[in-house]
């Protein structure tokens, strides 16, 4: 009888530890798989802007838009970040965004500077 109780207790302990490890792995994966992506365009014309540097504060990352104005930040932890763009000929653009594990798409429309 004593041996049976010991086996049951050991099995229950292993089950709890196993569930805890699986839960921690899932949580760690969820934190690091968010992404932020989108397109930068001229607000007046809708034309894609290439070569624009997009800064992601809170992650200390930068991305440069490609020929079609697209940018992407991958492997982000879920949370709040600030997106900042300072491009020649355009007004500074800044916005706080919340990135989730599913990711976040953000279209950025830059206003030309006033002369």
Image (cartoon, rainbow, N blue to C red):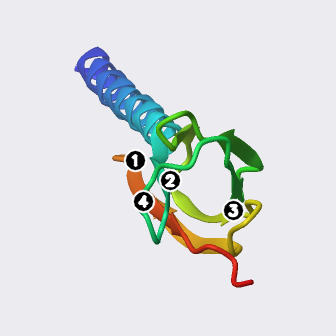
Left or right for 47, reference 114: left
Q: Are marks 2 and 1 in contact (CB under 8 Å)?
A: yes
Considering only order in the chain, which callout, 4 or 3, is on the residue closer to the N terminus?
3
Q: Which marked residue is nearer to the observer: mark 2 or mark 4?
A: 4
Q: Which residue is mark 2?
A: 78
Q: Which residue is the site of mark 1?
A: 101
Foreground residue among 50 and 95: 50
State the CA–CA distance, disc 3 to disc 4. 12 Å
The residue shown at (42%, 30%) is 17
In-front residue for pair 113/39: 113
Q: Where the N terminus falls, by quadrant? A: top left
Outermost residue to the front: 115
Query: How far across and how far down the image is residue 89, in percent?
Result: 73, 66
Disc 2 to disc 4, how far (Cα)? 19 Å
| Crowd class of label 1 (few under 14; some 14 to 19; many from 20; radius 10 Å) | some
Question: Could you tell me how far apart the alpha carbons at marks 3 and 2 are, in whole angstroms?
Answer: 21 Å
Secondary structure under the numbered disc 4 in the rendered image = strand
- Residue 5: give x, y in percent of width and height: 27, 25
Q: Estimate the spatial distance between the alpha carbons at disc 2 and disc 1, rounded to whole Å.
A: 6 Å
Residue linked to disc 4: 107
Q: In the image, residue 68 lies at what x, y percent?
A: 47, 38
Q: CA distance from mark 1 to mark 4?
A: 19 Å
């Amino acid at each position: 009888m004593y041996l049976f109780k010991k086996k049951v207790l050991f099995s229950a302990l292993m089950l709890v530890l196993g569930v805890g490890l699986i839960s921690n792995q899932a949580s760690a994966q969820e934190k690091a798989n968010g992404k932020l992506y989108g397109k930068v365009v001229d607000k007046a014309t809708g034309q894609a802007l290439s070569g624009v540097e997009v800064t992601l504060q809170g992650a200390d990352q930068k991305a440069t838009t490609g020929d079609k104005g697209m940018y992407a930040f991958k492997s982000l932890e879920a949370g709040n970040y600030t997106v900042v763009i300072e491009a020649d000929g355009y007004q500074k653009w800044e916005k706080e965004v919340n990135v989730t594990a599913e990711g976040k798409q953000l279209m950025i429309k830059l206003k030309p500077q006033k002369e």
